[in-house]
Image (cartoon, grey):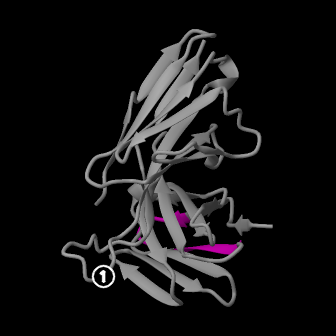
Amino acid sequence: GAVVSQHPSRVICKSGTSVKIECRSLDFQATTMFWYRQFPKQSLMLMATSNEGSKATYEQGVEKDKFLINHASLTLSTLTVTSAHPEDSSFYICSARLVPLPQGSSYTTGTTDTQYFGPGTRLTVL
Amino acid sequence: GQNIDQPTEMTATEGAIVQINCTYQTSGFNGLFWYQQHAGEAPTFLSYNVLDGLEEKGRFSSFLSRSKGYSYLLLKELQMKDSASYLCAAQDSNYQLIWGAGTKLIIKP
């Protein structure tokens, strides 16, 4: 299946510092990636949609100046948490959208339009 | 508005069968997904339904009724490792996933 990596898997930082999280699609090109945040015992919360070559679309209540998203290539999106505070401590998960090639292509993924998740990054801000 | 409902928690016995229900309301519909999430880990893809009916994949099956806005995930021959949260997500007309809160499944010996 499609593989998405995320780095780092765990980070502990001091309050006021910035943290960058990378999300890579390893075996497919992803024009769209999504960033989620998940607090303990809660469901996923979509933060923003990252489109290659354009500005990210942020969900209501998510500060775009605090959570900087860059989707510089078809296989890489980054999320930078600027001036992190303890309340930003959370599990950050990215996903990449895999869109199957049209029928008749020389190669088809055999999959549906599906989001595949990275392993997540646990951020702890002291 | 858009909404996904699924039970908060279910308990089942090892070796048994359990059905996790999900109802949805979305602006347009492009499919229904089920994901499994173990504690402390990211979700993993289980199934996708866009047409009515049952899709079987090993011990797991997923059913969809578009007219009723309803889906279920059926897990057979339950194993202890199946203890996890199961997330239902519907894809709207913009291909954005609308997530349920997840169903925590507890498997007892």
Instruction: Identify the residue at horizontal 67%, vertical 27% (top origin).
Output: A65
Q: Is residue B106 visible?
A: yes
Could you say which is closer to the camera, residue A85 or residue A55?
A: A55
Horizontal side of A45 relative to A92 (left or right) equals right
User: As displayed, is residue B104 above or below residue A10?
Assistant: below
Q: What residue does disc 1 label?
A: A103
Which residue range is magenta in the image? B12-25
Instruction: Identify the residue at horizontal 56%, vertical 60% (top origin).
Output: B87
Element type at mark 1: loop
User: As displayed, is residue A28 above or below residue A101?
Assistant: above
Residue with the most extreme left position: A106
In the rendering, at what x and y percent does residue B71 appear? 59, 79
Question: Few, some or many C-alpha atoms within 10 Å of disc 1 (few <14, some 14-19, many ≥20)?
Answer: few
Horizontal side of A116 relative to B32 (left or right) equals left
Tell me the quadrant of the picture where the N terminus of chain A can be found. bottom left
Horizontal side of A60 relative to A6 (left or right) equals right
Residue with the most extreme right position: B1
Instruction: Identify the residue at horizontal 76%, vertical 39% (top origin).
Output: A61
- The chain that hosts pointer 1 is A
Tell me the quadrant of the picture where the C terminus of chain A can be found. top right
Name the amino acid, label 1.
Answer: Gln
